[in-house]
Image (cartoon, helix red, strand yellow):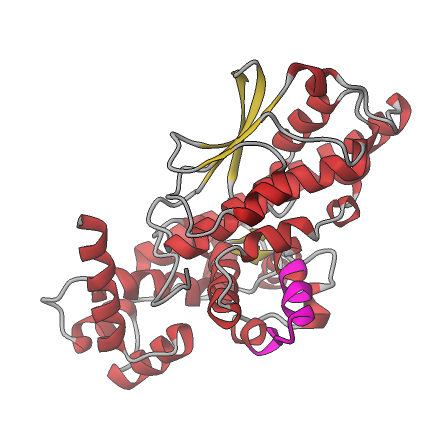
Amino acid sequence: MTSSGPTGFSGTSRSTSATIRPSILRYLAVVARERGIDLQPDLTAVGLDTAVLQSPELRVSYRQGSSVIARALDLTGDPALGLAVGGAQRMTAWGPLGFALLASETLRDAVELGVRCQNLTGAMLVFSIQAGHGGFALRADLPDPELDQAVGVFLLDEALSSVVTLIRLAVGDSFAPRLVEFAYPAPADSTRHGELFRCPVRFGAEANRCVFTPGWARSPMPDRDPWALASMMALLDREMSSRREQQDLLEVLEVAIARSLPEVPSVAEQARRHSTSERTLRRRLAQCGTTYEAIVDGVRRERVEQLLGRSSLTLHDVARRVGFADERALRRAVRRWHGMAPLELRRALDELEKAAVH
């Protein structure tokens, strides 16, 4: 299954806010390079490059991530690419959280800690713990039900395969879940799923989840260490508090910009609203891995996609409502975002809408 057309039309702030660690993109670039594919042009197209990806402070947006993933799926033609990326993961990529997981008392404690701190892992899904199933289950949900199907499959495959891979690195290669379930339809060939998970794998299920047996759930972590865990948790608590403040700032700015369109508040005006200086606001945004101009661009992109979905609006109407000087500026922006003309994007959006209905 390869991706086609635009992806990620979520209309939510998470789509444009730079709040995700780029772990998935780093491993995706490595896997692609091993297959002779250079993703650098596609990373550059969304404002990233190799040097930037190595920055520990970098955060990427959901849209940046999904755009690069969609392109990688097209270039590789591999519908199970997510399994390869998940299987390449290493605990050290999670920084202090990785060490905290290793220092946890039991496997269940480690999984529950990972769910609690999931915003620090670079996860592009929403994880939760479910009791029952003869033990407990780790559930993964897509944040946007309208996400491009191929990108959604990639994210689910990557998420659950990385969980199993990291657990094996921590507790031993003999680990296997009791059951793994995916809500998406069965692929033409699920051999690789069976080889990686080494347990029954069901498709078309009620939810996406990895089910643990009671024995594995209670098993002690080989490197458990209460002192190390407490030390790492102090660092994690501070980082989570900082990330919440940064995400709140990004979402407040996005809402303010969206409400003001077609006018765009200046950075100075936004700084006054937050009782700070323009320099300080820009510094805070840099700490979030983004700029005010990038946020404006993301909000405009969301609005353009929404308006192009309304066939009654002309391109002149769309350009005016989003704050572009003219149709030419709109065309340049859409070409930069999607690699296609506005009318082509409108047709793609219409096809997605029809596919969703059927």
User: Left or right of 44: which side holds 11?
Assistant: left
Question: Looking at the rendering, which quadrant does residue 236 occupy?
Answer: top right
Q: Please tell me which residue lies in front, 114 or 220.
A: 220
Report the span colored magenta.
Answer: 27-41
Location of residue 45 with respect to 257 vertically, above or below: below
Residue 157 horizontal/vertical position (percent): 53, 46
Q: Please tell me which residue lies in front, 197 or 141.
A: 197
Location of residue 105 with respect to 16 vertically, above or below: above
Q: Please tell me which residue lies in front, 315 or 66.
A: 66
User: Left or right of 173: which side holds 36?
Assistant: left
Q: Quadrant of the N terminus?
A: bottom left
Question: Looking at the rendering, which quadrant does residue 230 occupy?
Answer: top right
Q: Residue at x 69, y 19 (%)?
A: 217
For the image, the number of numbered tags is: 0
Residue 28 is a magenta residue: yes
Q: Residue at x 25, y 76 (%)?
A: 344
Residue 242 horizontal/vertical position (percent): 66, 41
Residue 274 seen? no
Q: Residue at x 80, y 33 (%)?
A: 172
Question: Looking at the rendering, which quadrant does residue 175 occupy?
Answer: top right
Q: Residue furthest bottom?
A: 328
Residue 32 horizontal/vertical position (percent): 63, 68
Residue 302 horizontal/vertical position (percent): 34, 60
Residue 40 seen? yes
Q: Main secondary structure of the magenta part?
A: helix
User: Left or right of 199: which side holds 51?
Assistant: right
Residue 30 is a magenta residue: yes
